[in-house]
Image (cartoon, rainbow, N blue to C red):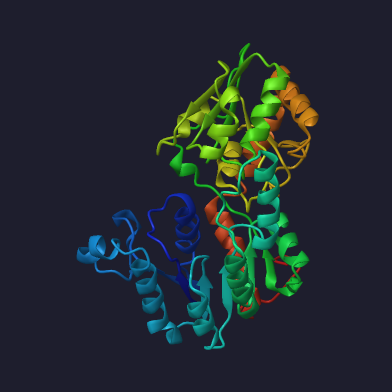
Amino acid sequence: MLKLSALFPIHCNDRAISHVFFSVCKEWQNSELKARMVVPSCDSPCRGSHIVEAIPTLLTKVYYRFPSWPKNEAEKRFIKDFKDFDAAYLWPGISEETVKSVSKHNKPIFYERVNSYQRQAKSILDRAYFSLGVEPQHLITEETIHIEEEKVKVVDFLFCPSPTVVTSFQEAGVSEDKLLLTTEGWAPERFPNYQFSKLPSEEVNVLFLGFACVRKGVHLLLQAWEKAGIKGKLTIFGDMEPAIAQTCRHLLKRPDVVHFDYAFDYSSAYRQADFFAFPSLEEGSALVIYEAMGHGLPILASPVGGGGVVRDGIEGIILDPYDTDAWVEGLRKLSKSPDLRAKMGAAARKRALELTWQQVAARRREQILQKTNRLPLTPANR
């Protein structure tokens, strides 16, 4: 049995990015691979024998008054007994010093990559903000890029959640042997009332769900929607970046554009939609894509937004996010064809059922065991 110690640097509440960490690691509790999860703190439903909270429960409020303390405590707790484990699984946000400290143990380090290589991401995002006439509002700097490069030098393997992420690191000169192509996943049990066979209506409801920001290409979607002249509404469900609110003010005031701030229970948004639009410019592999597919929604997305799991012409339509005419045509095509939506929606649902967290974690487990020489590489699990 391989004993893996996993380190996640922020509070784990089984939502957003911590949902990925928790969903994968909780599946690694068997005779082949047993994972211990070290976190600063977590919500009570996450607690169990396999999770270690670095901060005493009674002191949580004190520690979170100081932004760096929780992460520092988690890193110290992780290093304290890492010698008793066979491999490490590290997440972004961990300090460069801790990654280098772990590497001194000469044990395999698996490093999660949530997004593409930062230098490439910065170039993509700078272009997008400048095209809107606003200063870039992302957090990628030359310093954060340097830190990422130093971490990548010492880790052994990078979990890349989409082909786009793999390519970004290949182009940065990272050895292909280090790059492990994987996916994200979804939890059907979180959506007990899902609906994947919506009756057609005269007016369509096109859904974007997520942080409505420049990175997700929301401004491009709004521009295409205005030109498409579709009978229906565009629903934007999620918190909105000021840059979008400012530069797309006139488009957001359209009567056929509806905006809802993020809410914890968003399953109804999927159930009420006819198809999902996601023209993301920079992405790893968005969880909302898996959830939308699980609800039987056909997907209209950019190559990055599709995350490598949406196949053009099967589960949806893949388009260059900057090709406004193509997006206008794509919006019209799905809006006017209930039969096409039904066909693609059924394919999307079938595809999503192959991408539950149990299945994703099982495939990642095989990759870990192969790379640590605990599992023979055969044609069946190659």
Q: Give the quarter of the image for residue 61.
A: bottom left
Which of 149 and 9 lies nearest the eye of the viewer? 149
Q: From this viewpoint, is residue 245 visible? A: yes
Image point (65%, 13%), residue name: 231
Position above or below: 244 against 360 = above
Image point (35%, 67%), residue name: 70
Q: From this viewpoint, is residue 31 visible? A: no
- In-image side of 41 versus 255 (left or right): left
Image point (67%, 50%), residue name: 126
The mark total stands at: 0
What percent of the width, then of the height, locates residue 168?
73, 61
Position above or below: 71 against 376 = above
Position above or below: 176 against 211 = below
Q: Give the quarter of the image for residue 74.
A: bottom left
Position above or below: 282 against 235 = below
Image point (55%, 20%), residue name: 253
Q: Which residue occupies the extreme left position in the image?
A: 58
- In-image side of 194 versus 165 (left or right): left
What percent of the width, then of the height, locates residue 336?
72, 17
Which of 125 and 290 lies nearest the eye of the viewer? 125
- In-image side of 250 versus 29 (left or right): right
What percent of the width, then of the height, locates residue 209?
54, 36
Q: Give the quarter of the image for residue 112.
A: bottom right
What percent of the width, then of the height, locates residue 198?
58, 22
The quadrant in which the C terminus is found is bottom right
